[in-house]
Amino acid sequence: MKSEALFREHGNQVAALCWRMGKRGLEVLLITSLNAKRWILPKGWPEADLTGAENAAREAFEEAGVTGKIHSQPVGHYHYLKEKREGTGMPVRVEVFAMAVTRQLDDWPEKAVRTLAWMPLNEAAAKVSEPGVKLVLKAFQKQQAMQHRPATATRRHV
């Protein structure tokens, strides 16, 4: 596919930061990479006929078997060096879209080749090896804390 080759040549990918409110509060979903079995976010090469958010949701479904409400704007981005088969590396920029997971399927396309785990944000940030992913997770945690902070009573001085 020509458009897919264009994206790969330029090194742009999308990822889904899948989250839910679980027994331990806000949890995020990590999956293992195909080869190194490192903990990562579901990510991949975008298809030209889909938006960034739609592509991220597609990756979350294919790689982790989850669906939900995905935010149309990225919550952050990071860079990494993608190892190519011939041993060289390609710089890749990954836009990350937050997805509030509403459904987790029992079966999905990549179930046999990936492990997944839900965990609190702090634990997820400690498990991922990419520094950029750690920063995106920490920024998301701060953003969520601000949105869910209890309102404080204001006092009027007379």
Image (spheres, rainbow, N blue to C red):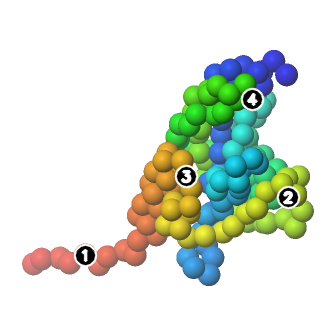
Q: Which residue is mark 3?
A: 129
Query: What is the crowding at mark 3: few (fewer than 14 residues within 10 Å), some, or many (at least 20)?
Result: few
Q: Earlier in the sequence, mark 4 or mark 3?
A: 4
Q: Which mark is residue 111?
A: 2
Q: Earlier in the sequence, mark 4 or mark 1?
A: 4
Residue 105 versus residue 72 in the image, above or below: below
Say which of marks 3 and 1 sits in front: 3
Say which of marks 4 and 3 sits in front: 4
Q: Nearer the viewer, residue 110 or 152?
A: 110
Q: Nearer the viewer, residue 19 or 50?
A: 19
Q: How far is the residue under mark 4 from the one under mark 1?
A: 60 Å
- Is residue 116 in view from this perspective? yes
Residue 139 versus residue 53 in the image, above or below: below
Q: Which residue is mark 1?
A: 154
Looking at the image, which residue is at 87% across and 67% down? 106
Secondary element at image label 4: loop
Q: Earlier in the sequence, mark 2 or mark 3?
A: 2
Say which of marks 2 and 1 sits in front: 2
Q: Are marks 3 and 1 in contact (CB under 8 Å)?
A: no
When asked about the image quadrant of residue 13, the answer is top right
**Placement of the C terminus among the 4 image quadrants:** bottom left
Say which of marks 2 and 4 sits in front: 4
**Placement of the N terminus among the 4 image quadrants:** top right
Q: How far is the residue under mark 2 from the one under mark 1?
A: 51 Å
